[in-house]
Image (tube, rainbow, N blue to C red):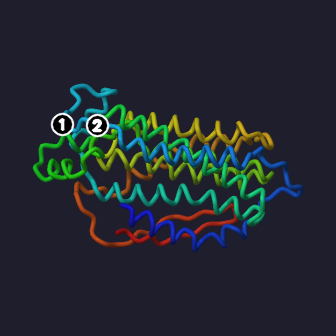
Amino acid sequence: MRKAWLATLALTTLFLPAVARAQTTAPEAPASPKVRWALDGSITGAAVLGTALASLIPVDTSTRWQRELLPFDRRLEGRTSASAAKTSDILAAVDVIMPLGLLLGQGGMNEAYGKRALLYGETVSVSLVLNGVTKYLVGRPRPYVYSDDARVQEYAQSQGKDSHLSFYSGHASTTFAASVAGAYLFAQNTTDKRARATVWGFELALAGATANLRTRAGKHFYSDVIVGALVGAAVGFAVPRLHGGPKVRLSAAEWVAIGTAPVAGVAIAQLLPAKADLTVPLGAVVLPWATPSGGGLMLARVF
């Protein structure tokens, strides 16, 4: 999983020059968000440290829940798909990295970009620490834990604590936090409503697809990804908004993108093949890539 993330991040970086060519900045540069480098940097660092320390919280890995949070969660018990899990990892990586490229394309490597990049990192870090602490305290078994297949049970045992970190979905919360924060910070720095709607739509579609694939992978229940999406979106809006900067007045097209893109992402992900497997062979996948001025495809290696 870590190799898949690293490979995707490296490949994504190759496309940043194309993103940088998108001319979407306003004629007059708007005021930057209010950032205190020491304070916001410390908050980001503390959140990262807190996420790491959360792993020290003990988790009971010997039990299965007798009741689920939502009635329709039951239909996911026993589900397993490493193929869907790997695809969700790659989509999540693209979703998280893309806003940094888009922000860079609005004015290059300057102080304003540094402030927005720090706020973006702070948002993702806060989302991660909230998710990490909650996961370890709740200790909810993942759907695949309920499988009676001996191979799946052996896999669950090999995962240790991770097999009981289902609530709530870190992939969903992280991607929705990244999507909302990235699109919001992008919107603060441009008056191009078409470009803004494109960013909102593409980012949230990736987040919706990622969340759906986590349920198809047997990594999370429906309630996990629903809560993750809501918490992530709230953090993604709150952190940048609390730091001020230009007010974002959304156009009708942006509201349509915000409302429909996650649903479209879920629908598209539902059409993707997801085998009931435990391992994924070496291979590559082709993923969509979009910028305000165009789009294309990117090749990502799966390890």
**x then y, percent, for residue 105:** 72, 64
* Closer to the camera in the image, 120 or 191: 120
**x then y, percent, for residue 135:** 38, 37
Give the residue at the far left of this rendering.
150
**x then y, percent, for residue 284:** 38, 72
- Residue 62, numbered circle: 1
Q: Secondary structure at mark 1?
A: loop
- Split into 4 quadrants, where in the image is the N terminus? bottom left
- Residue 200, numbered circle: none
Work out whether 51 lies above or below 12: above
Cα–Cα span, label 2 and label 1: 9 Å
Give the residue at the far right of this rendering.
28
The reply, left or right, for residue 2 in relation to residue 142 is: right
Q: Which residue is mark 2?
A: 59
- Residue, x 37% and y 48% (percent of image)? 214
- Split into 4 quadrants, where in the image is the C terminus? bottom left
Residue type marked 1: Ser
